[in-house]
Image: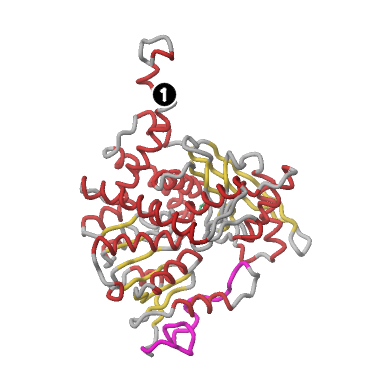
């Protein structure tokens, strides 16, 4: 893709995200004023972060923080470090966060942040300086009751720890509740590390109840083998689902007999070169056997096959789990997607024209704003634990997460069946109702234009 195409795609991404509101509002009771308010981000901050590099030179990185809407609570959302970060992308991601928090009914609005950088090119100390430098620039924009960051693509607990520490230094008091996804000894929550994957796993379990299938008959492909992709694959395989393909940014592997996920995770983690933060290995390192490691422990010794990320999407499987980046399933390849179920672990993997195609061909898509909401839900638990100074067991976290995910899934699915609409439209309609009700509680024109003079008469 050339630079012009990639700029056009990134500008479209926010417009495409917002356009989904117009479809969903037909199924919601949102006031037109509230709908209009939701189409505009509340605040946008662009920052330049000067970083002293290890060789003595200075590099200036560009970053963003966007707060989309805070009517339902402080804004919430991750920070990503990626070369593809752009303002329209961060705006779309902030908007999705607002909708996501409303779908699972946790008391947060939506935000997102990003820095244009390839973190794999930085040393550990450069990465720490960049993380602290970003917080220095956004310190007045965030806060435990204002805007609470978290990890996202290529950021992790250690980076959250540095960021929390920097914010606490600026405020001159310990402030664990300013950021979530922290290491456990710094106030992180048990169960936050696998929460996004686990939330998606609970969605698959809900589908399983509805469709009464036998997990061992179900073939799954996972695009993206980062934190969320690894955990959803691990949990599904432990439950007898057959994971036949996985991929990462360097490519993928397909193995008809199923891939040994714990070994694939171990293999990916084992080959670190840059820092503790990033692994240089890739899931497609060793095609000789499906478990990614030559000493295959599974009964079926058939070899794996190297595939591209595009090929993975088009495999003949039952469940497709896009867990990488945005815009993977588009008008261009939607026709070739054969999976009957899709569970979106990535944010925004499907464009709206691809959505129409999939729906018309009978595929059921569990949308990102529901399927990947497990991460922010446990972030909410972490924030609540930090504020209470009282910590929960891992079982308590899992139980509460499962309760929230299955209730949200049931609400979305009910609207889908009642109104014969895609689960995405239903999820947005529920989000619009919840955010719209909060906006309306502060008064809209139907209230203010009434002739009554006293507020007390209302
Ligand atoms: N980055 C994650 C997401 O996109 C988590 C956000 C959070 O925990 O605030 O949902």
Q: Is residue 262 magenta?
A: no
Q: Is residue 281 magenta?
A: yes
**439 lies left or right of 381:** left
Residue at image coords 49%, 43%: 110
Q: Mark 1 falls on what kind of element?
A: loop
Front position in the image: 424 or 262? 262
The correct choice, above or below, for 237 with respect to 396 in the image is below
**427 lies left or right of 387:** left
The correct choice, above or below, for 149 with respect to 288 in the image is above
Residue at image coords 45%, 56%: 374
Count of numbered labels shown in the rendering: 1
Q: Which residues are magenta?
A: 277-300
Front position in the image: 89 or 70? 70
Q: Please identify the dominant SS of the magenta region.
A: loop
Front position in the image: 118 or 137? 137
**Please, which colouring scheme is shown?**
secondary structure
Name the residue carrying label 1. Answer: 443
């Amino acid at each position: 893709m050339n630079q012009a195409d990639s700029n056009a795609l990134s500008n479209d991404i926010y417009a495409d995200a917002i356009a989904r509101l117009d479809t969903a509002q037909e199924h919601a009771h949102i006031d037109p004023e509230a709908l209009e308010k939701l189409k505009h981000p509340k605040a946008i901050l662009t920052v330049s972060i000067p970083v002293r590099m290890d060789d003595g030179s200075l590099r200036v990185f560009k970053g963003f923080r966007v707060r989309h809407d805070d009517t339902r609570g402080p804004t919430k959302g991750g920070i990503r470090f990626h070369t593809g970060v752009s303002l329209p992308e961060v705006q779309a991601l902030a908007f999705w966060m607002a909708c996501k928090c409303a779908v699972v009914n946790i008391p947060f609005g939506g935000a997102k942040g990003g820095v244009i950088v390839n973190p794999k090119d930085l040393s550990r100390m450069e990465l720490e300086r960049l993380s602290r430098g970003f917080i220095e620039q956004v310190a007045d924009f965030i806060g435990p009751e204002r805007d609470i960051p978290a990890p996202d693509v290529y950021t992790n607990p250690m980076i959250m720890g540095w960021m929390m520490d920097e914010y606490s230094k600026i405020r001159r008091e310990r402030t664990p509740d300013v950021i979530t996804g922290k290491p456990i000894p710094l106030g992180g929550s048990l169960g936050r590390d696998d929460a996004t994957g686990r939330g998606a796993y609970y969605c698959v379990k809900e589908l399983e109840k509805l469709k009464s299938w036998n997990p061992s008959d179900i073939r799954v492909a996972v695009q993206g083998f980062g934190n969320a992709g690894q955990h959803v694959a691990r949990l599904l395989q432990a439950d007898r689902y057959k994971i036949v393909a996985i991929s990462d940014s360097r490519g993928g592997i397909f193995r008809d007999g199923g891939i040994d996920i714990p070994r694939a995770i171990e293999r990916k983690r084992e080959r670190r070169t840059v820092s503790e933060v990033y692994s240089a290995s890739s899931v497609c390192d060793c095609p000789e056997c499906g478990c990614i490691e030559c000493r295959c422990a599974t009964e079926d010794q058939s070899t794996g096959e190297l595939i591209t990320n595009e090929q993975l999407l088009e495999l003949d499987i039952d469940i497709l789990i896009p867990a990488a980046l945005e815009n993977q399933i588009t008008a261009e390849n939607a026709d070739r997607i054969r999976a009957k179920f899709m569970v979106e672990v990535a944010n925004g993997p499907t464009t709206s024209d691809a959505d129409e195609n999939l729906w018309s061909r009978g595929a059921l898509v569990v949308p990102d704003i529901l399927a990947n909401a497990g991460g922010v839900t446990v972030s909410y638990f972490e924030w609540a634990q930090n504020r209470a100074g009282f910590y929960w067991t891992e079982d308590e976290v899992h139980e509460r997460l499962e309760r929230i995910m299955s209730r949200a899934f049931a609400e979305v699915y009910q609207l889908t069946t009642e109104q014969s609409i895609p689960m995405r439209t239903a999820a947005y309609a529920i989000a619009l109702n919840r955010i719209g009700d909060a906006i309306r509680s502060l008064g809209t024109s139907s209230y203010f234009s009434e002739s009554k003079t006293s507020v007390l008469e209302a």
